[in-house]
Image (cartoon, helix red, strand yellow):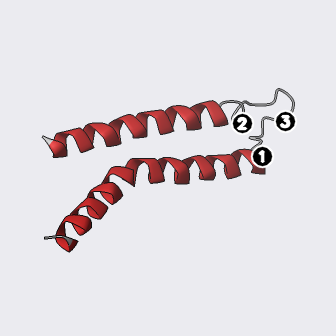
Amino acid sequence: MIKVMLILWYLLIGFVWICGLIINLSGEFQYNALNHKKKISIWSIVTSLFLTVLFLIIALLPNFIGAVVQWLVSLFH
């Protein structure tokens, strides 16, 4: 049951992450009517990388909590 909950947790965090990236990068891939070049700003790339690292930390947080609990139990066993 815990594995199913972790898979659902990863899917939820992944869905929110993808939505955040779409919102962050939605205006960056609009074509300009004059030169038809893609304009990607450095700021959007930096914020996208920050969002990626943040959501990876959030997604892996239950694993770290479980490892700490197992370590504490093994200490006092």
* Label 1 or label 2, whichever comes before in sequence order: 2
Residue 19, how many percent across, how many down? 52, 31
The residue labelled by disc 2 is 28
| Residue 41 badge | 1
Q: Secondary structure at mark 2?
A: loop
Mark 1 residue crowding within 10 angstroms, few (<14) / some (14–19) / many (20+): few
Outermost residue, right side: 34
The residue labelled by disc 3 is 35
Residue 31, how many percent across, how many down? 75, 31
- Identify the residue shown where x is 82% and y is 26%: 33
Q: Are marks 1 and 2 in contact (CB under 8 Å)?
A: yes
Establish if 8 lies above or below 49. above
Foreground of the two, 71 or 37:
71
Three-letter code for the amino acid on which mark 2 is drawn: Glu
Q: Secondary structure at mark 3?
A: loop
Quarter holding residue 35: top right
Q: CA distance from mark 3 to mark 1?
A: 16 Å
* Label 3 or label 2, whichever comes before in sequence order: 2
Outermost residue, top side: 33
